[in-house]
């Protein structure tokens, strides 16, 4: 059941990545320049207070972690981050391959 839940989350993340890819593509065609929605911008648009709270919590642990790790991820295109995370979840929680020829009890 847990495997199915995480596969569903991975599939939803892949669907979100595809939506952002189409959205960025349409904006790029309309503006005639490359336009990408960064994950940090998207998170800021949804809930700015939670991003600031996460930054202060991570800065309390290690300021270098926020500056070198999290900022790097937040500056990537949203479709790429969601797509990679969705693919990783789908691969990690794929069903086990059935044994062929005999059954192990």
Image: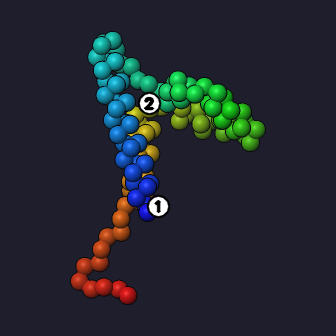
Give the colour scheme shown: rainbow
Residue at 34% x, 32% y: name it: 19
Residue at 68% x, 32% y: name it: 53
Q: Position of residue 49 (x, y in %)?
A: 64, 27
Q: Position of residue 39 (x, y in %)?
A: 49, 30
The quarter holding residue 60 reads: top right
| Residue depth check, mark 1 versus mark 2: number of the one nearer the observer | 1
Q: Quadrant of the C terminus?
A: bottom left
Q: Which residue is mark 1?
A: 2
How many neighbours does mark 2 have within 10 angstroms: few (below 14), some (14-19), or many (20 or more)? Answer: many
Q: Residue furthest top?
A: 31
Q: Which residue is mark 2?
A: 77
The quarter holding residue 69 reads: top right
Query: Is 85 positioned to the left or the right of 29 in the image?
Result: right
Could you tell me if residue 61 is visible in this image? yes
Q: Is residue 9 above or below residue 102?
A: above
């Amino acid at each position: 059941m847990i495997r199915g839940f995480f596969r569903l989350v991975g599939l939803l993340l892949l669907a979100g990545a595809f939506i952002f890819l189409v959205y960025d593509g349409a904006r790029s065609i309309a503006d005639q320049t490359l336009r990408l929605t960064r994950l940090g911008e998207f998170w800021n648009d949804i809930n700015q207070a939670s991003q600031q709270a996460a930054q202060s919590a991570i800065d309390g642990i290690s300021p270098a972690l926020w500056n070198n790790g999290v900022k790097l991820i937040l500056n990537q295109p949203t479709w790429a981050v969601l797509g990679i995370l969705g693919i990783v979840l789908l691969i990690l929680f794929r069903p086990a391959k059935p044994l062929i020829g005999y059954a192990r009890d």
